[in-house]
Amino acid sequence: MKEQQIEEYEISSCTMFLKPVVYGSKIYSQIYEVEDCFLSPFKPLDIIKNSCDYFGVDYESRKRGTRKLTGYNRKNPIAIEPTNHIFFFPTASPSIPECIWLSQAHIKDYRRAGANQTLITFHNKQSYLFPVSCSTIETQLLRTALLKSTILQRIEHKGRKLTYLLHVPKTLQASESIHEYAGEFSKGEE
């Protein structure tokens, strides 16, 4: 894969992970998609934040929501766009420059490759080595699965309520008829 340099980027369902890379004196992001690789002049956390904004909710709100739904306070996964199943999790505290963000949906398998190294295989059959322990990846995948299932259950529950309301029998009527008032309106208009 040839890496293309880009200025703007929003995470999509094709984004597999965001990896920080030192580029001169700045931290850039290598963005890995299913079929492409990009280099962005923004840090991974900035791309996560901008992507949340792009989908209409700011990062801090998503972070607070995750805390409320899961009870976790550190290294929280983020629901960037839940209806399209776009959930990402950090490999470390998002505030540290080495933090990598991974898409839970693209991970097919993972295994320990060393003391603090994990080999992750994605659904597109590509594998990458990450400088993070296998137990951290496992914990983050479980946290993300909890967040995802909680949010999707709520969306589904609301959908069932909406379906019920849209299909209420049409024979229901108000206790008073508009015809009772028709005569009074015409009297006042004269």
Image (cartoon, rainbow, N blue to C red):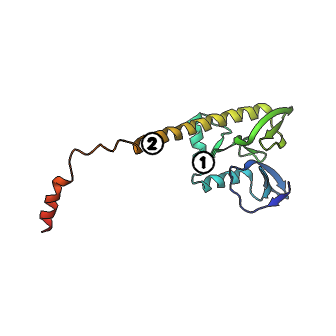
Front residue of this view, candidates 148 and 180? 180
Secondary structure beneath label 2 = helix
Q: Could you classify mark 1 by the number of other residues whose Cα lies within 10 Å: few (under 14), some (14-19), or many (20 or more)?
A: few
Front residue of this view, candidates 172 and 28? 172
Identity of the residue drawn at 57% across and 54% down? 56
The residue carrying mark 2 is: 163
Identity of the residue drawn at 53% across and 41% down? 155
Q: How many marks can you see? A: 2
Q: Nearer the viewer, mark 1 or mark 2?
A: 2
> Against 145, is 103 above or below?
below
- Whole-percent x, y for residue 158 in the image: 48, 41
Q: Looking at the image, tell me whether mark 1 or mark 2 is earlier in sequence order.
A: 1
Q: Amino acid at mark 1?
A: Glu
Task: Name the outermost residue toward the bottom.
Answer: 190
- Numbered circle sitting on residue 45: none
Q: CA distance from mark 1 to mark 2?
A: 32 Å
| 66 displayed left or right of 178 | right
Secondary structure beneath label 1 = helix
> Against 162, is 42 above or below?
below
Identity of the residue drawn at 62% across and 56% down? 54
- Whole-percent x, y for residue 129 in the image: 85, 40
Figure quadrant of the N terminus: bottom right
The residue carrying mark 1 is: 60
Q: Amino acid at mark 2?
A: Thr
The image quarter containing residue 161 is: top left
Figure quadrant of the C terminus: bottom left
| 53 displayed left or right of 94 | left
Front residue of this view, candidates 69 and 74? 69
- Label 1 with label 2: CB-CB less than 8 Å: no
> Can residue 68 be seen?
no
- Whole-percent x, y for residue 10 in the image: 68, 56
